Every structure is written in C-alpha cells, then in structure tokens.
Amino acid sequence: MARPVQGLPSSSLADISFMVLIFFLLVSTMDQDMGLQRRLPPMPDPNQKVDDVQIKRRNIMVVRINDADRLLAGGSPMEVSMLKDKAKEFLLNPTNDENLPEKVEQTIEGFGSFPVSKGVISLQNTRGTSYNAYIKVQNELVKAVNEIRDDFAMQNFGKKYFALTEDQQRICRDAIPQNISEADPKDTGRKK
Amino acid sequence: MAKFSRKGKGGVPELSTSSLADIVFMILLFFMLTTSMRQGEKKVSLKMPGASEIAKLERKDLAAYIYVGTPIPSEQAKYGTDARIQLNDSFRSVDDIRDFIAAERETLSEADRQFMTVSIKADENVRMGIVTDIKQELRRTSALKIMYAARKAGAGEL
C-alpha cells in the first residue's frame, strides 16, 4: 500500500530566514549620506595670467574665520547667528545701495527678465580654523540662499522651493545663484 | 453512542507557522531594499558637524569617501593622535589622494565619471589645514564635486 507523501516540515524555514535577516541587519547601514554639496573651482592654468577675473569691491563680501573661530563678515566681526541676515541683505540689496552688489537684468528661459545679483560671498579660513566652525558658517550661507530662493518661489509660484517642479527650480537657481567662493589658502596665492 | 466524536482532547488547535517564513522574508526584503552594505571599516573616530541645510546624496554608488579624524584608540599606538586621512581601509597621506581618486574613477562607467562626488567625512574637531590640503589636491585631480558630510541638526542645537 502506497504511503501518501508527507509534507516537508517548513517550521525551520522561518529560523533560516531569521538568520539571513540578522545577517543583513548586521552588514547593512541605514544612515543616509547627507551633507553640504559644493563645487570646487577648477585649478587655474599655470600659464594663464592671474587676476583675469576682476570683481568690483561692492560685489564681494569677504567672510573670514580665524584660528580662534572668530568671524569677520563684510569688515565687521559678528556672531554666526547674525551672518545669515547679513548675507541675505548683501545678496538681495533691497534698497539698491551703492555699497551693496549691483544687479544685472538677465533673461531667464521660461520666466522672463529678472535682476540677478552679482554678489559673491568669499569664504576664507586659516589652517587653524576648526572644521565645525567652517561647516557652521557654510551652513548659514547656504541657509541665506535657500531662504531667498524660498521667498522668490513663494512670490512667483506660490510654493516653497522644494515643492516646485524641476523646471521651476532651475528658474529659481538661475535667478538666485549660490555664489559662494572658497578662496585658496593664503600661502598659495589668491583667486577671486 | 454519538456518531460524531471529536478527535483528540479538544484543546486549542496549533497555530500554523507556515506563514511566518513568508513574513520574515518580507521583512528581509524590506531591509535589503532600504539599506546599503557597510563599506570598509572606519579607523578614525568620527563625529560629524551638525548642519541644517544639508541635502541627500542622490547617487550613493558614485561617491568616494575620504575620512578625516583622529585614529580610534586601538590604532593610536601605531598612528598617534593627530588627525589622519583614511582612504579605503588604511591611513594615507594627502599625496595618495590622486591615486585614490583615479582608482575610484576607474570603477565607474564612462558616462558616470563626471557625476562622481567625493564625500569628505571629517570629524568636527579637525583643523581646516588638513581639509584645505585635501581640497587643493582634489582640485588638482579635477574631482570638483564634493560634499562636506554632516549630520542633520535643527537650528537650536547648532
């Protein structure tokens, strides 16, 4: 008499898959890579003449951090918390001040003409500056630009910057460029 | 005599465990999709600076990592307590970055090379001198897309 085939015991399957699960938990990471993204300026050509880019004095704001992590922005010492407003004032130039950056009417594709600020924030540091202070200052400057972009997006599209479509975000980026220049270290010559 | 007699003692029937495996596999699949493999071993102690305006790195596979920080206690006997640069799994000097970047470029496909991002993961206590050296070296190798790795922090805790 033929015996019916018994079902395979599947209770151990769960144990095995638990083991695989634990293995994956151990070897994988959940942490996302987050950070401030930057673009470095290309190395200047040694044959090229230095100082080919002359920037007017009113168009540049120098932010300097010294060895003791003290901050000097636009010629006056200040706290990191004040830097954002200073940078916003510099980039927006709401009253068209003579000493703040000039604006140039530029045609932005899909939007029209818009007075784009020519302001450049030059960030300088010494070798003794702590990385923490440097990142804090970078963060404040990025925050200033982001807030201006948000305002711009709110006025023109009625939405925050991150809620816009790809094309609208490009318009915002063109209208409010993020001009933060990381100057060369002092001893290797200056640029911008 | 009752025609329908119940088999057994009439206790609670045993729970079926056959779906347990399916459920565990589902969790497993979730973890495999949401996480990425841990790469390399960190040999520096790393507490990244906090920042609020950080953006996510979109293509993790295109990233090269440079760690900067003090060696972990077990390595300090050999390498001291000064901030060091770690590339892949060993401590290197600034001059090795060129080769490291070249090797990383090689692993990417032709089309992706221009999108390669170098993620600088530095401890918040390192001095800018070493970071500036790295930046200068990266500029020389024209790896211009960089990211200063930071951890998410609200405005209050900065």
Image (cartoon, rainbow, N blue to C red):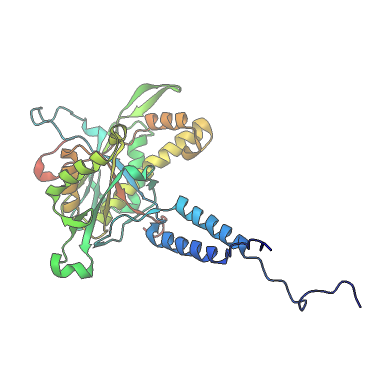
Q: Quadrant of residue A187?
A: top left
Report the front residue among B75 and A143. B75
Residue extending farthest front = A1
- Position of residue A113 relative to residue B81, above or below, is above
Judge from the rendering whether residue A122 lies leftward or rightward of residue A17; answer left or right: left
- Residue A128 at what x, y percent from top left? 16, 56
Q: Quadrant of residue A107?
A: top left
Could you tell me which quadrant the C terminus of chain B lies in?
bottom left
- Residue A159 at what x, y percent from top left? 52, 36
- Position of residue A111 relative to residue A179, above or below, is above
- Residue B11 at what x, y percent from top left? 75, 77
Report the front residue among B71 and A192. B71
Could you tell me which quadrant the N terminus of chain B lies in?
bottom right
- Position of residue B76 relative to residue A175, above or below, is below
Q: Residue, x 50% and y 30% (percent of image)?
A: A156
Report the front residue among B48 and A105. B48
- Residue A91 at what x, y percent from top left? 34, 36
Q: Residue, x 14% and y 48% (percent of image)?
A: B96
Residue extending farthest left = A47
Report the front residue among B115 and B38. B38
Q: Residue, x 72% and y 71% (percent of image)?
A: B13
Judge from the rendering whether residue A12 lies leftward or rightward of residue A66; answer left or right: right
- How many numbered circles does the render carry? 0
Observer able to see residue A20: yes
Q: Quadrant of residue B16?
A: bottom right
Judge from the rendering whether residue B107 lies leftward or rightward of residue B57; answer left or right: left
Observer able to see residue A62: no
